[in-house]
Amino acid sequence: MVPVSIKLYTSAITVITSLLLSGCNLEPAYHRPETTLPASWSYKDSPAEGVNTQALSGPFFSDSKLQQLIKLTIENNKDLELAALNLKKSGVQHGVDNLSWLPGINLTAEKSAAHEPAGIFESVITSPVTYHQYDVKLVSASWEVDFWGRLRSLREASLNDYLSAAAGSRSLKISLIEQVVSAYLKYINDREDMAIACQKLKNTLQLRHMQQQAFSAGGLTKNTLMDADNAVNDAQSALLQTKLQAQQDINLLQLLVGAPLPDSLFNVSLDHNWTFPLLKAGTPSAVLLKRPDIIAAEYQLKAANARIGAARAAFFPSISLTAEGGSSTAAMSQLLSGGTAYWNFVPTITLPVFDGGKNQGNLSLAELNNKIEIVNYQKAIKQAFREVSDALAGQSSLNRLFIQTAKLYDTGKEQYRMTEKTRDAGQISNEDLLIKNNDLLTLRKQMFDVRFKYLIQSVKLFSVIGGDNAI
């Protein structure tokens, strides 16, 4: 027959184990907020031959120079390095939070001494006494039984905070890639502008020289010559401005990359065959869920949802267990010997009775934070949808506009060749040819400006669709 004490002990262990394994969960059931959006993007004159984001395979930036630039940036940028360190810090903090439910176990050794003088009692004659006590606590443990899921909810919130930080780190990386590629293309474009401005200045100086000769011969008025001087000043100012802009571009690139830029990156022009995906209409709006900022917003929402569970659990009794055991004796030499063992087990139940409304305030705050995160999530979704819509429409429109400006430039080149033949036939002067060359340079600049805007819009598309597979 099993002794009654053993039965009671077994029952107690069973009850405690059941409480530990099947504790209550006071968190609200999580449901992703609904956001009313079209199932896909549709915009006028969208390309039929493109691909949607789900069909993309391989890197977004397939050009070797862009891949080299992005690789240098990822390896050397200080903002990315700082983000990686902060993410590690968040991971360590989550690890600490995740261990909060485990009991803390300590090993301690103590010595206490006390002295009582003689004659401290009126009825009894006593001699002076000195007491010594030595204690070794081999086990000293305390932990909270998470019956209401408070600690579990806090661990869940901590995990989602960490995952949100990880998504935020990825968002920073995508944003940085967009910035550095855009800055690189801007430098290439400004360098083209500088070459055009330089050629225009040469043409304008030649025109000024011809007009000076005409003025000296009496065939030109002073006012016309002054107009030529103003044209030279304008051309010089335009060249200086493009040189300044190009230098600022290089300075920004060096800051973003964080490392010396190899010369091989810059032996390319804006009319290089840059290849970016051209996305077609019908791209599913579900692609937004891959964006790291949307992912981060949802993790923040999940964390806020978990904190409601922790705030609700504060209204219920908390159960804590404290246990210790070891050896206690008056002589150090007798420690851990027979007859000196002791143990102590203290279960504690704390029921909140009056807290001045603190628990209710914390719950209301947690519920408000949850509502705020719901709005933030829905706002992020709508903002992302607009960004993708603008990027898709912009890419398509600018691609068509570039084709038109390229045709205008080709027509301008043909007209310039015809003007050269007319000049060679003696029907017009060199002055007319220089003016026609400046007109052609203006068309070239217009074409490159549109080309640059199209490329920037394509880079923007990489960012707004979530930046998968940069290189």
Image (cartoon, rainbow, N blue to C red):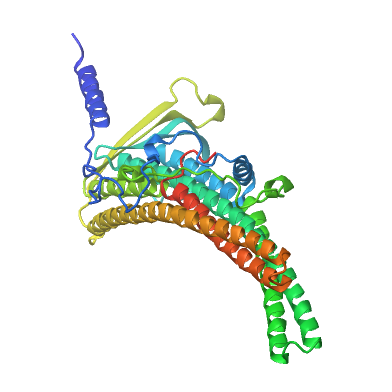
**Image point 57% across, 56% down: which residue?**
410
Image position, residue 50 (x, y; %): 40, 41
Image position, residue 175 (x, y; %): 50, 51
Image position, residue 212 (x, y; %): 78, 83
Q: In the image, 208: left or right of 446?
A: right
Residue toward you, 362 or 242: 242
Height in image: 214 above or below 239? Answer: below
Q: In the image, 62: left or right of 234?
A: left
Q: How many marks?
A: 0
Image position, residue 245 (x, y; %): 65, 66
User: Quarter of the image containing the N terminus?
Assistant: top left
Residue 100 visible in the snapshot: no
Residue 246 visible in the snapshot: yes
Residue toward you, 437 or 282: 437
Q: In the image, 375: left or right of 54?
A: left
Height in image: 34 above or below 203? Answer: above
Res. 286 image quadrant: top left
Residue toward you, 2 or 39: 39
User: Quarter of the image containing the C terminus?
Assistant: top right
**Image point 64% across, 68% down: which residue?**
436
Give the residue at the far top of this rendering: 1
Q: In the image, 301: left or right of 119?
A: left
